[in-house]
Amino acid sequence: MKVRFIVPQIEKKLRLFIAIKPPREAIEELMMIQERVSEKLDHPIRRVPPENVHMTLVFLGDFLSTRLDAIKMALAKIVCPRNALNFDHLELVGRGQRGGFIWIRGQENPTLSQLRSDIHFILGMPEPLLDPFIPHVTLFRLRRLKTYALIRPIIRELRVKPVHFASQSFSLFQSQEGPDGRHYLELAHYSGNNEGL
């Protein structure tokens, strides 16, 4: 009698999000803003490394790895319009006991809002009604809330050179926690009419 053992596929949870990756020139400008902010602040804050810089469109959350192919195929049906993106002022944003962020905020963009709506629709996800979308690129992460009172007036008064770039693409990323911090793995890239991945 022949016996064949079948090893079940292990389903792994993936933390996924959809984002726009700025072009190299824009990332260099954002790094210059990081440098200027660091010079102004006399407090320990953690910079977002250039390879992690992005503008989140939709946070998907945790999905089983077995659903990944279906998500990729669904996103490929979206027509990605050209977006003119403008980021022009810094904000300090708190997240309770989890710390907070310093980000550069972007201007409202109806084309970007439509792209987000298309993503929610194609994935069968309801759009959040109580959490309005704010275009932004995170530059720093803060772990200690006690520094907020000291940092906030500096950030409020600090003027930075606006960062502008155009995009006609977006990517699906997986957020991974490692011993040296968080990394974002690009799983798929979509551009234009998405005739193919």
Image: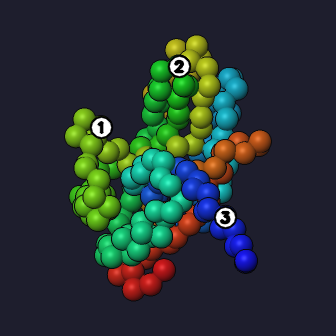
**Residue 109 visible:** no
Count residues near mark 2 (Cα–Cα under 10 Å), then give few for <14, some for 14-19, many for 20+. few
- Return the residue at label 3: 7
Residue 97 is tagged as 2
Residue 131 is tagged as 1
Q: Which of marks 3 and 2 is in front?
A: 3
Q: What residue type is labelled 1?
A: Asp
- Residue drawn 25% across the image and 61% down it: 121
* In the image: residue 2, left or right of residue 142: right
Q: Are the residues tagged 3 and 2 within 8 Å (C-beta)? A: no
- Residue drawn 32% across the image and 45% down it: 133
Residue lying farthest front? Answer: 1
- Residue drawn 47% across the image and 53% down it: 63
Q: Which of marks 1 and 3 is nearer the N terminus?
A: 3
Mark count: 3
Residue lying farthest bottom? Answer: 195
Q: What residue type is labelled 2?
A: Gln
**3D distance between C-alphas at marks 1 and 2:** 19 Å
**3D distance between C-alphas at marks 1 and 3:** 43 Å
Q: What residue type is labelled 3?
A: Val
Disc 1, SS: loop
**Quadrant containing the N terminus in the rendered view:** bottom right
Q: Which of marks 3 and 2 is nearer the N terminus?
A: 3
Disc 3, SS: loop
- Residue drawn 50% across the image and 55% down it: 64
Count residues near mark 3 (Cα–Cα under 10 Å), then give few for <14, some for 14-19, many for 20+. few
In this orientation, which residue lies closer to the viewer: 70 or 137? 70
Give the percent coordinates (x, y) of residue 158.
50, 33
Disc 2, SS: loop
Q: Are the residues tagged 1 and 3 within 8 Å (C-beta)? A: no
Give the percent coordinates (x, y) of residue 55.
47, 53
Q: Toward which corner of the image does residue 5 lie, by quadrant?
A: bottom right
